[in-house]
Amino acid sequence: MQPDPNDAGTLEALMIRLSEYRLPRALRILDKVNQGEVLLDSDLEFLHRVLEDSRDLRPLVERNPDYLSLVSRLADLYSEIVAKSLENEKRQNGG
């Protein structure tokens, strides 16, 4: 399915933001938690902002279902980050 032409500019801007900012930062955070670290407040704020933006973008993705797989994979990435950080916190706190 082709993206809705009315959404093309928005989708392009979102893809640029994803590739240049959000994905690289998320991967750095994932590396950090994979090394046993926990999330900093700034990391949590970033993930919270991403979650809020995702909710706001739901209608855009519904109109452009070709992006659903990408959104799903990103959600999995963010979930993995949070789960790993929680494991690290429990381990640091003796749990």
Image (cartoon, rainbow, N blue to C red):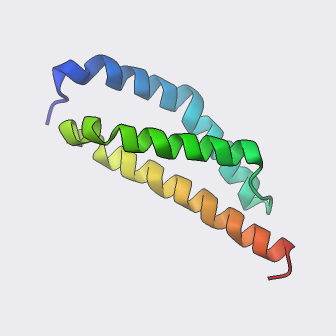
Q: Decide: is 4 above or below 26.
A: above
Query: Which of the image's four quarters has the N terminus?
Result: top left
The image quadrant that residue 15 belongs to is: top left
Residue 60 to residue 85: above or below = above
Query: Residue drawn 55% across and 40% down?
Result: 49
User: Would residue 57 be found to the left or right of residue 23 on screen?
Assistant: left
Q: Is residue 27 above or below residue 82?
A: above
* Residue 37 pos. (x, y %): 80, 58
Q: Residue at x 19, y 19 (%)?
A: 6
Q: Nearer the viewer, residue 41 or 9?
A: 41
Residue for point 42% across, 27% down: 14
Which residue appears farthest toward the bottom when viewing the image?
95
For residue 82, side relative to residue 31 (left or right): left
* Residue 87 sits in quarter: bottom right
Q: Tell me where residue 67 appears, x and y as whole percent.
A: 30, 40
**On-image quarter of the C terminus:** bottom right
Q: Is residue 9 above or below residue 63?
A: above
Q: Residue placed at 71% from the left, 51% from the top?
A: 31
